[in-house]
Amino acid sequence: MSRAARTIYVWSIYALVVGAVLAVIPNVILGALGVAETQEVWIRVLGVVVIILALYYWDGAKNEARHLFVASLLGRGFAVAAFILLWLTGGPWQLLIFAAAEVVGTAWTYSALRE
């Protein structure tokens, strides 16, 4: 597995865990982040979507799908910008935790792709 693929593989595991928690026990992660707990189904739907994305990334890493690695830089960069914008417009500060995780992951993937 290339270094770039490894960055995507690690990200897929992170996404799989976050997605599973959101889908099965969402209030655990919400409570840990200081966000109000919910009984709404939509947080679980988001968890399912994150799991699906994690599976795409897992497969992409396994198959050395370099085009996916490059595309992930755009998507993850957008996520950083969106999380910061949401925070700036009144969203909870905890969005910055996810933004920071994406900055670190994106930088790692970018660095690996430059090799």
Image (spheres, rainbow, N blue to C red):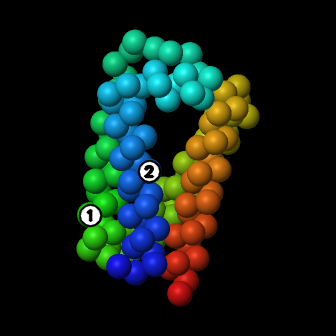
Q: Position of residue 2 (x, y in %)?
A: 40, 81
Q: Nearer the viewer, residue 72 or 57?
A: 57
| Residue 59's disc number | 1
SS assignment at label 1:
helix
Q: Residue at x 29, y 57 (%)?
A: 56
Residue occupying the far top of the picture: 39
| Residue 14's disc number | 2
Vertical relation: 109 (above or below) 80: below
SS assignment at label 2:
helix
Total number of numbered discs in the rendering = 2
Amino acid bearing label 2: Tyr
Q: Position of residue 39 (x, y in %)?
A: 40, 12
Vertical relation: 101 (above or below) 28: below
| Residue 99's disc number | none
Q: Residue at x 30, y 67 (%)?
A: 60
Q: Residue at x 60, y 29 (%)?
A: 33
Compare marks 2 and 1 and give the one earlier in the sequence.
2
Amino acid bearing label 1: Asp
Residue 47 visible in rendering: no
